[in-house]
Image (spheres, rainbow, N blue to C red):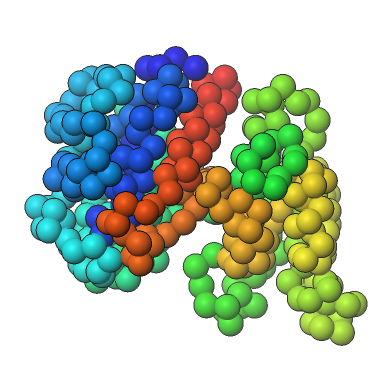
């Protein structure tokens, strides 16, 4: 992969651990060898993170992306947002922090849509700070969908191959039929159409990763049940009978390599062992908890269905440890590597 490949990293919420993970991963040789990076955010915030971690790095404001070099000791920053973000207190919810995270994301998306960067990698934001800033969306996924005018978008939590406890040849992805909603609303929001859409997105992603590794076989997608033990033939709920099984049948009839619904407690074990390349979960925690137990610090968030490539760390702002030098940068490293791999498959296509 050419070192000229340019990736934009968003700063995320300045009160959280995002700036620390960016700085902590900056000197990784595997990234220095494969790409150039630019941070979208605030110079002063990145300078504080460099000082906190005691790294021999310099931070420089740039005014044009052509100024981004592969200098391993220089962090170029495309500065956006207000100076109020520079004064945000660690671990505190604020409108200033929400504005900073939103401004960085939208600027990065604009660069990606204009094909000025190959991919974007986002540091975490805080949903309460977003709300305080007047942003009506609950998180990255919804903001990205609106800005990119994409109607069928979903979040996949992905554990790359060889990381954590996953044995499959391309790793394991978990996509969610519902995402940032209250648990009681899952039963209202679920639909056959949405499950089929997620099966399609999961298939597209898995097939792309298989081809990137020279594996010429159909993807294998497992669809999770919603109720305990798959509903026990209606004893614990009829969603499997009335909703999920018909959706799986419709997806299979459309040529998608899917099976299920499978009880989630055994499905995730089978998937980790390599029987499935991706899993369609019915709600957020059903997929997140299982995959993070398999490899929290190696997990990556990938947004599917966008016209751009976006990956992210698989953790939140971690206000409890923010700006204490304790943040683990490994998810940021893996998110950047996954973005580069996806950018490579896009170039081939």
- Residue 132: which quarter of the image? bottom left
Instruction: Looking at the picture, tell me which residue is in the foreground, 284 or 327.
Output: 327
Q: Residue furthest bottom?
A: 235
Image: 111 above or below 124: above
Left or right: 131, with 210 as reference point = left
Q: Residue furthest top?
A: 2
Give how far across and how far down residue 285 sits, in percent. Answer: 60, 67
Marker count (numbered): 0
Q: Is residue 189 visible?
A: yes
Q: Residue 45 location in percent, x, y?
A: 19, 48
In percent of the image, x 31 and y 19: which residue is there? 70
- Residues 121 and 256: in front is 121
Left or right of 267 on screen, residue 10: left
Residue 341: quarter of image = top right
Residue occupying the far left of the picture: 83
Q: Is residue 184 above or below residue 242?
A: below
Give the position of the C terminus as an image quadrant: top right
Residue for point 43% across, 49% down: 328
**In this picture, is 143 found above or below 35?**
below
State which quadrant residue 47 falls in. top left
Which residue shows up at 48% across the image and 45% down it? 331
| Image spot of residue 126 (x, y percent) | 34, 64
Q: Is residue 256 left or right of residue 63?
A: right
Is residue 191 shown left or right of residue 130?
Answer: right
| 320 relative to 31, above or below | below
Percent of width and height locating residue 60: 16, 31
Relative to the observer, which residue lies in front, 290 or 204?
290
Q: Residue furthest right?
A: 233
Residue at 18%, 26% in the rendered image: 64
Nearest the camera: 339 or 25?
25
- The answer to whether residue 41 of the structure is visible from this angle is no
């Amino acid at each position: 992969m050419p070192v000229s490949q340019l990736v934009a990293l968003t700063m995320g919420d300045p009160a959280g651990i995002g700036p620390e993970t960016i700085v902590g991963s900056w000197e990784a040789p595997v990234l220095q060898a494969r790409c150039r990076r630019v941070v979208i955010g605030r110079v002063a915030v990145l300078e504080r993170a460099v000082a906190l971690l005691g790294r021999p790095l310099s931070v420089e404001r740039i005014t044009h992306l052509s100024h981004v070099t592969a200098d391993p000791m220089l962090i170029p920053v495309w500065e956006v947002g207000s100076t109020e973000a520079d004064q945000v207190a660690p671990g505190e919810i604020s409108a200033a922090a929400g504005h900073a995270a939103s401004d960085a994301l939208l600027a990065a998306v604009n660069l990606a849509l204009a094909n000025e960067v190959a991919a974007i990698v986002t540091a975490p934001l805080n949903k309460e700070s977003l709300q305080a800033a007047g942003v009506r969306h609950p998180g990255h996924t919804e903001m990205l969908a609106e800005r990119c005018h994409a109607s069928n978008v979903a979040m996949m939590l992905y554990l790359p191959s060889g990381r954590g406890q996953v044995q499959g040849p391309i790793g394991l992805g978990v996509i969610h039929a519902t995402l940032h909603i209250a648990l009681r609303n899952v039963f209202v929001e679920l639909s056959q159409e949405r499950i089929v859409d997620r099966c399609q997105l999961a298939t597209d992603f898995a097939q792309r990763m298989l081809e990137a590794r020279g594996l010429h076989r159909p993807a294998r997608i497992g669809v999770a049940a919603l109720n305990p033990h798959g509903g026990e033939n209606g004893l614990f709920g009829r969603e499997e009978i009335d909703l999920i099984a018909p959706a799986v049948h419709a997806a299979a009839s459309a040529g998608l390599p899917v099976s299920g619904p499978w009880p989630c407690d055994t499905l995730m074990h089978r998937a980790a062992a390599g029987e499935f390349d991706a899993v369609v979960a019915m709600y957020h925690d059903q997929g997140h908890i299982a995959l993070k137990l398999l490899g929290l610090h190696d997990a990556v968030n990938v947004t599917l269905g966008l016209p751009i490539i976006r990956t992210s760390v698989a953790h939140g702002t971690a206000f409890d440890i923010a700006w204490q030098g304790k943040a683990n940068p490994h998810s940021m490293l893996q998110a950047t590597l996954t973005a580069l791999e996806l950018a490579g498959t896009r170039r081939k296509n």
